[in-house]
Image (cartoon, rainbow, N blue to C red):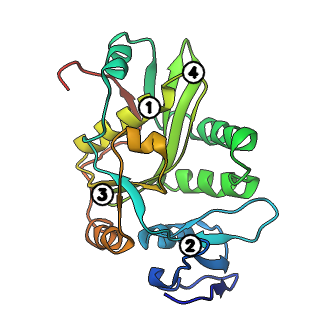
């Protein structure tokens, strides 16, 4: 750890070690660079992600501790199981990535700041088109009412943002993601930072060092996923 941050050139050839991230603000590691596909993939492979507002330069973060959960071990409450059995909602994967990120951006603008900027949206749509970023959509009567998006590298999924227009629809998206990633033999889902919502679903905090160990081991391993585009269904035996 050190008490200064690295300023990246426009053409990024590498990031500083995550151990150099500041304690205050927690995890701030570098400033500058670009949001090109190769740069973003390189960052996520090291546990680094961009997070900044419209008026900021690009800020890169690696917080500690890190909020994660293991696919298949997400806590699904009795009430959520009951809701899933009713089959009110239809869940798909990778059917409308741009719509999901736009909804997530709108939610953040209304309640939590504007960090999903137009530049960020453009960058993550490019990641999706390149096969790295994916979305989960929750539909009711043909209307998009919940969802999430993130990146998949090897056997690690990096969850970026979620939204709910109706109660519990982001939880439905997380349940579908957890179940599908478990089938595909993913090892970990990164949720970045702590929230009570994530903790209620069974996510846990681990150290940056342990998180880096997971990345080193599993980012280079191939999952058993053959096709991301799916229509997901809840089965009662789970």
Sequence-wise first label, 3 or 2: 2
Query: What's the CA distance linking mark 2 and mark 4?
Result: 35 Å
- How packed is label 1: few (under 14 Cα within 10 Å), some, or many (20 or more)? many
Query: What's the CA distance linking mark 3 and mark 1?
Result: 22 Å
Outermost residue toward the right? 55
Image location (x, y in percent) of residue 142: 57, 16
SS category of the residue bearing label 1: helix
**221 with respect to 21 (left or right):** left
Residue at image mark 1: 171
Select label 1 or label 2 by which is in front.
Answer: 1
Residue at image mark 4: 166
Select label 3 or label 1 by which is in front.
Answer: 1
Sequence-wise first label, 2 or 4: 2
Q: Which mark is residue 39?
A: 2
Query: What's the CA distance linking mark 3 and mark 4?
Result: 31 Å
Residue at image mark 3: 155
**117 with respect to 5 (left or right):** right
Sequence-wise first label, 3 or 4: 3
SS category of the residue bearing label 3: loop
- How packed is label 3: few (under 14 Cα within 10 Å), some, or many (20 or more)? many
Select label 3 or label 4 by which is in front.
Answer: 4
Q: Which mark is residue 2?
A: none
Query: What's the CA distance linking mark 3 and mark 2?
Result: 19 Å
- Residue depicted at 30% across the width and 20% down the height: 78
- How packed is label 2: few (under 14 Cα within 10 Å), some, or many (20 or more)? some
Above or below, 135 relative to 145? below
Q: Nearer the viewer, residue 85 or 34?
A: 85
SS category of the residue bearing label 4: loop
Image location (x, y in percent) of residue 5: 62, 85
Residues at circles 2 and 4 in contact by the CB criterion of under 8 Å? no
Image location (x, y in percent) of residue 98: 63, 40
């Amino acid at each position: 750890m050190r008490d200064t941050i690295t300023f990246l050139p426009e053409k990024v050839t590498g990031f500083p070690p995550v151990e150099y991230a500041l304690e205050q603000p927690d995890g701030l590691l570098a400033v500058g660079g670009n949001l090109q596909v190769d740069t973003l993939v390189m960052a996520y492979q090291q546990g680094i992600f961009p997070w900044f507002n419209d008026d900021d330069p690009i800020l890169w973060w690696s917080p500690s501790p890190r909020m994660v959960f293991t696919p298949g071990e997400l806590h699904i409450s009795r009430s959520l199981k009951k809701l899933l059995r009713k089959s009110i909602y239809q869940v798909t994967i990778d059917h409308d990535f741009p719509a999901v990120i736009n909804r997530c951006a709108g939610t953040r603008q209304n309640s939590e700041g504007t960090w999903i900027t137009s530049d960020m949206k453009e960058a993550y749509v490019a990641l999706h088109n390149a096969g790295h970023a994916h979305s989960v959509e929750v539909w009711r009567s043909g209307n998009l009412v919940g969802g999430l998006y993130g990146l998949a590298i090897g056997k690690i999924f990096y969850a970026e943002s979620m939204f709910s227009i109706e109660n519990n629809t982001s939880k439905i998206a997380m349940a579908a993601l957890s179940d599908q990633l478990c089938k595909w033999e993913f090892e970990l889902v990164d949720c970045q930072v702590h929230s009570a919502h994530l903790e209620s679903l069974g996510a846990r905090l681990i150290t940056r060092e342990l998180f880096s160990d997971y990345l080193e081991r599993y980012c280079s391993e191939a999952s058993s996923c053959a096709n991301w585009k799916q229509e997901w269904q809840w089965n009662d035996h789970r």
